Amino acid sequence: MGGFILRRVLYMIPTVFLVSIVTFIIIQLPPGDYLDTLAAEMGEAGVDNSAVVEQLREQYGLGQPMYLQYWKWMSGILLEGDFGISFEKNLPVTDVIWDRLGWTFAISLLTLVFIWAVALPIGIYSAVRKYSVGDYVATFFGFVGLAVPNFLLALVMMYVAFKYFGQSVGGLVSPEYLDQPWSWAKFGNLLQHIWMPVFVVGTSGAAALIRIMRANLLDELYRPYVVTARAKGMSEFQLLMRYPVRVALNPFISTIGWILPTLVSGEIIVAVVMNLPTTGPLLLRALLVQDMYLAGSLILIVSMLTVIGTLLSDVLLAWVDPRIRYQ
């Protein structure tokens, strides 16, 4: 297992390298760059911008070929941990994304816990009590969760929370706590707000995993080993949790590889709607104004989450199912 993990970590290096190349090329494909956008905005304001734009182009090296710009970006990341400069904010990318990245990871991890806490018991119940009223109710809400867009659910919940419960909506804390230092009162206010984005972002993922768990467990409930264990007098709960559920968890665990990046990327529109201080609005703005180092760094982080999530799912699969061996 140790050798497998080491090999996978080594495979991650060229994978992330190739992803960074593709990311940088895609960001550069639209015509123009950030300075063209800036020049257009300054021109609309009636400002003579030619000298300023040329000075900035020389400063940022935007007139250089694409491969030189890419090498400047990647060498800074690998040798100095420098992700480049955010052109629009004129700050290092790390300073711009640090706080927002922390909130994004916090919401994503809480959402992952929420998804598993909801999907696992409901999926087991739906399989064990198939075609019951509870199964039909879970199936109905599962399809609704998959069908309703996250941003629409966010708008509905914000309206209900404000209209009927008088709760301030938007952001992770109430306006009076925005510039206040952390305290128990501010932390309690955070708990009153953070559940809503966690619920909104996690609804579709939980709905999908409920269906996956139900289908996987139904495939295992009538296998010969289950019938044999039942015939030997094993209790239903012990039998269920020890054998079929453990086997049915395999595809369930393997979804970590795509859930982690999906949570981060799927949070973008929700973050814009709910005014969350996460990387979603930052990435959207960076793409709109062609702030290439900022956008590229954020996309690269999401890509690394995909690779890391796949590694975690493989390790967990080997731990849950001893039949799996990595040669």
Image (cartoon, rainbow, N blue to C red):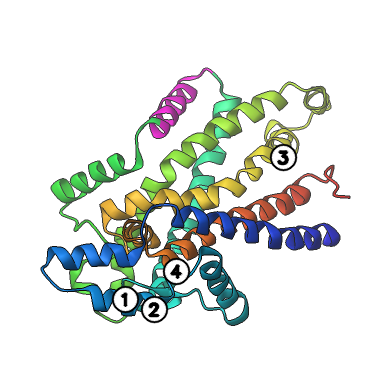
Structural crowding at the residue carrying mark 2, measured as other residues with C-alpha within 10 Å and reported as few (<14), some (14–19) or many (≥20): few
The residue tagged 1 is 54
Q: Quadrant of residue 168?
A: bottom left
Q: Is residue 302 left or right of residue 31?
A: right
Q: Is the stretch drawn in magenta largely helix, strand or loop? A: helix
Q: Tell me: residue 86, above or below residue 105.
A: below
Numbered mark located on residue 246 in the image: 3
Helix, strand or loop under label 3: helix
Q: Tell me: residue 304, above or below residue 88.
A: above
Q: Nearer the viewer, mark 4 or mark 2?
A: 2
First in sequence: mark 4 vs mark 1: 1
Q: Is residue 224 left or right of residue 85?
A: right
Q: Are marks 2 and 3 in contact (CB under 8 Å)?
A: no
The residue tagged 4 is 102
Q: What's the amino acid at mark 1?
A: Glu
Structural crowding at the residue carrying mark 1, measured as other residues with C-alpha within 10 Å and reported as few (<14), some (14–19) or many (≥20): some
**Looking at this view, is 314 or 88 the one in front?**
88
What segment carries the magenta color? Answer: 131-146
Q: Quadrant of the N terminus?
A: bottom right
